[in-house]
Image: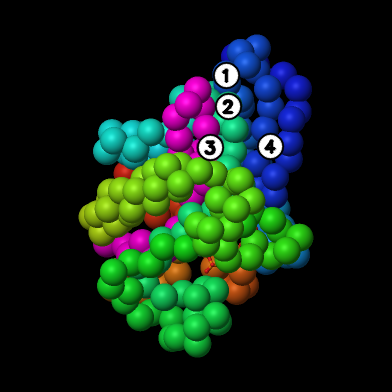
Amino acid sequence: MRRGEHLYAGKAKSVYTTDDPDHLILHFRNDTSAFDGEKTAQLERKGMVNNKFNAFIMQKLEAGGVKTHFERVLSDDESVVKCLDMIPVECVVRNVAAGSICKRLGVHEGIDLDPPTFEFFLKDDARHDPMINEYHIRAFGWASQEEIDEMIAATFRVNELLTRLFADGEMILVDFKLEFGRFHGEILLGDEFTPDGCRIWDAHTREKLDKDRFRRDLGGVVEAYEEVAHRLGVSLG
Ligand code: TMP
Ligand code: ASP
């Protein structure tokens, strides 16, 4: 399968058509960004690491009963996925307080959240991804109640599966963001699952092993992603 037309460039991935209208190629670039695209950089090996990391996680999720768009790895930094009609909302689950919830609610980073919280954000960088709720999603026609219920259930299922997977590698899955889309009448997990879109801490030292290293200028960004991959058993080749 070969890249066709360049459809769209996100902040860290580009999307291409293929010869099959049901499939797309995702190209994981070395670009990284934070604060809705305000801060950017190029990080060597990041595209390859994230492509392989994402493939590993998507396969684990499929094995755990979560339907995803993932088809197969095509090259070091490209994968074939199903072409979804994306729902423009981000689903965030938090097991531990960090990031925007700390600013919003004035709570300290590191507090355990029991039960884990669920939040929706609108995918809109220009408006800094505002927090929304189910009523906004229905009122503006972004998704139906049935689709909302499916996204919430799938996101909690992902949390169950991945909390365990990361714990086995002596890591804490602090929080993460998922995006879903429609494919022939079904809701599938789309986009990616990589350390760009989640927070992962070492279980003992609580060292940050995710994109917060870039956001906070801690250094060793790709090295941390590689450490997480290594602990999970992701083969980076
Ligand atoms: P937040 O603390 O900034 O709200 O983010 C929660 C988690 O979701 C964190 O792991 C980062 C991820 N996330 C994204 O990757 N992209 C986004 O646009 C948002 C809102 C969150
Ligand atoms: N909003 C996310 C962040 O702060 C994604 C991004 O801006 O790249 O990292």
Q: Is residue 220 above or below residue 27?
A: below
Residue 61: x %, y % from top left: 34, 39
Main SS of residues in magenta: strand
Q: Earlier in the sequence, mark 1 or mark 2?
A: 1
Residue that numbered label 2 is attached to: 83
Element assignment for label 3: strand
Residue that numbered label 3 is attached to: 181
Residue that numbered label 1 is attached to: 22
Q: CA distance from mark 3 to mark 4?
A: 17 Å
Pointer 1 with pointer 2, Cβ within 8 A: yes
Q: Earlier in the sequence, mark 3 or mark 2?
A: 2
Q: Quick check: is 171 in the magenta stretch?
A: yes
Q: Of residues 89 and 231, which is closer to you in this image? A: 89
Q: Is residue 200 left or right of residue 63?
A: right
Q: CA distance from mark 2 to mark 4?
A: 13 Å
Q: Earlier in the sequence, mark 4 or mark 1?
A: 4
